[in-house]
Structures are given as structure tokens and as C-alpha cells.
Amino acid sequence: MAFTSVADFFAMGGHAVYVWSAWGLTTAGLMGLVISTRLSRRAVEADIRRRVRRERSHS
């Protein structure tokens, strides 16, 4: 699909509201997934470190 101007690109042939809202929601969802995964990983790593310290102190 070729556009004659940048304005035509952002208008998306009259479907801009659908296209850009879908793009925005998808991007937000993916970013939320990345952030959630990183936070979960940090929590799991902290739990593992606590367990290892506890095991070492009881040995």
C-alpha cells in the first residue's frame, strides 16, 4: 500500500481510528507482558536467593 503523503499514511485511508487504536492496544499489551515478566522473574530470583541463604545458614 503506497501513500502519497505522511498525512495519508496517518489517515490510513479513513481507517485511522481502528488502525492506530489496534496498534496502540497491541503495543501496550506487549509492553505490559514484558514488564510483568521482568517483575515476576525478579521476584522468583529473590525467592531463590533467600532459600539458598537459608539453606547455607542451616548447614
Image (cartoon, grey):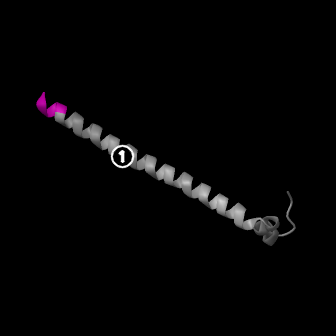
Question: Which of 18 and 35 lies nearest the eye of the viewer?
Answer: 18
Q: Quadrant of the N terminus?
A: bottom right
Q: Quadrant of the C terminus?
A: top left
- Residue 58: give x, y in percent of width and height: 12, 30
Local packing at callout 1 (Cα closer than 10 Å; few below 14, some 14-19, many 20+) is few
Three-letter code for the amino acid on which mark 1 is drawn = Arg
| Image position of 2 (left or right of 40) | right
| Quadrant in which residue 3 is drawn | bottom right
Q: Main secondary structure of the magenta part?
A: helix
Q: Residue at x 44, y 50 (%)?
A: 36
Question: Which of 52 and 23 lies nearest the eye of the viewer?
Answer: 23
Magenta-tinted stretch:
55-59
Question: Which of 49 and 13 lies nearest the eye of the viewer?
Answer: 13
- Where 11 falls versus 39 (above or below)? below
User: As drawn, which residue projects farthest toward the left?
Assistant: 58
Q: Residue at x 45, y 46 (%)?
A: 37
- Where 10 falls versus 41 (above or below)? below
Residue 38 forms part of the magenta stretch:
no
Q: Which residue is mark 1?
A: 42
User: As drawn, which residue projects farthest toward the bottom?
Assistant: 7
| Quadrant in which residue 16 is drawn | bottom right
Q: Residue at x 23, y 34 (%)?
A: 52
